[in-house]
Image (spheres, rainbow, N blue to C red):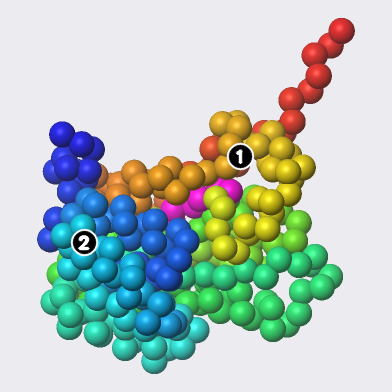
Amino acid sequence: MTLTNQPLFDLSGRVAIVTGTSRGLGQTFARSLARAGADLVLTSRNRESLSTFEAEIKALGRRAISLELDVRDAKSIEHMASAAEDGFGHLDILVNNAGCNVRKPALDVTWDDWNLILDTNLRGSFFVAQAVARRMIPRSYGRIINIGSVTSVAGYAGLAPYGASRGGIRQLTMSLADDWGQHGITVNCLAPGWFRTEQNKILYEDKEWMEYLCDRIPLKRPGESHDLDAAIVFLAAESSRYITGQTLLVDGGISTGATRALPKAR
């Protein structure tokens, strides 16, 4: 019996919304939940971009629908939540994954850069959670997983607005956990460390940077998508029923503050 087939990790009959599933970690999270038994609501600003991935989820034996969602638009958020509920009849799990980044030195960040990142990553996550929670509360059940980052707990040069948005996600998670716990809804933050995505792939082409990064990670490698499988299912399933308001770092240990080992004394 595999871990995800055990009752504590079985998502059969559950419906999960995963925002930002046109590529990257959003697809990783959706696959993991589908393999554990969940039916999926997939979202993207461009609904057509989801057709191939929707077919992949259905090939796993799950139901799936694709919906347009712009997390910077309140009407789009409400329309998505309403259509998702109409499509499946109930909503059990939300993975707040949609996000963006603009990597610049702090002195070069513009007003528009700041608004783009904070409106997408932080404000968008809140109002998506609000819209979905309104539909979870009458059933007294829900699992909300906000996707944060190692930057939720650590600062990095060139990532000022992004780090502010991810630090905000951590605080938001704790507040919503307190607000909605009485309704049977848990709210947690899953914070990946350094994983290669479309947003940061240029960094992984720099051999010197990769060596520096791996030196700082106790497990000596960046994350791979399958490293997140168990964590997302755990937070979405019955296994985490008494865990809320927490940030789970899946980062190879880089948040410990590890640095390059000192040479041995002679």
Dominant secondary structure of the magenta stretch? strand
Nearest to viewer (mark 1 / mark 2): 2
Question: Residue placed at 51% from the left, 63% from the top?
Answer: 169
Tell me where the magenta segment starts and ends, as one range: 189-194
Counting from the top left corner in percent of width and height, residue 177 is at: 36, 61
Image quarter where the C terminus lies is top right
Counting from the top left corner in percent of width and height, residue 110 is at: 76, 79
Badge number at residue 11: none
Counting from the top left corner in percent of width and height, residue 247 is at: 46, 50
Residue tagged 1 = 254
Query: Residue 142: in sight, yes or no?
Result: no
Looking at the picture, tell me which residue is in the foreground, 44 or 84. 44
Question: Mark 1 near mark 2, Cβ–Cβ under 8 Å?
Answer: no
Question: Residue placed at 40% from the left, 45% from the top?
Answer: 226
The relative height of residue 25 versus residue 134 in the rendered view (above or below) is above
Q: What secondary structure is marked by label 2?
A: helix
Looking at the picture, tell me which residue is in the foreground, 94 or 174. 94
Q: What secondary structure is marked by label 1?
A: helix
- Crowd band around label 2 with a 10 angstrom C-alpha radius: few (<14), some (14–19), many (20+): few
Counting from the top left corner in percent of width and height, residue 213 is at: 68, 41
Residue tagged 2 = 59
Looking at the picture, tell me which residue is in the foreground, 182 or 120. 120
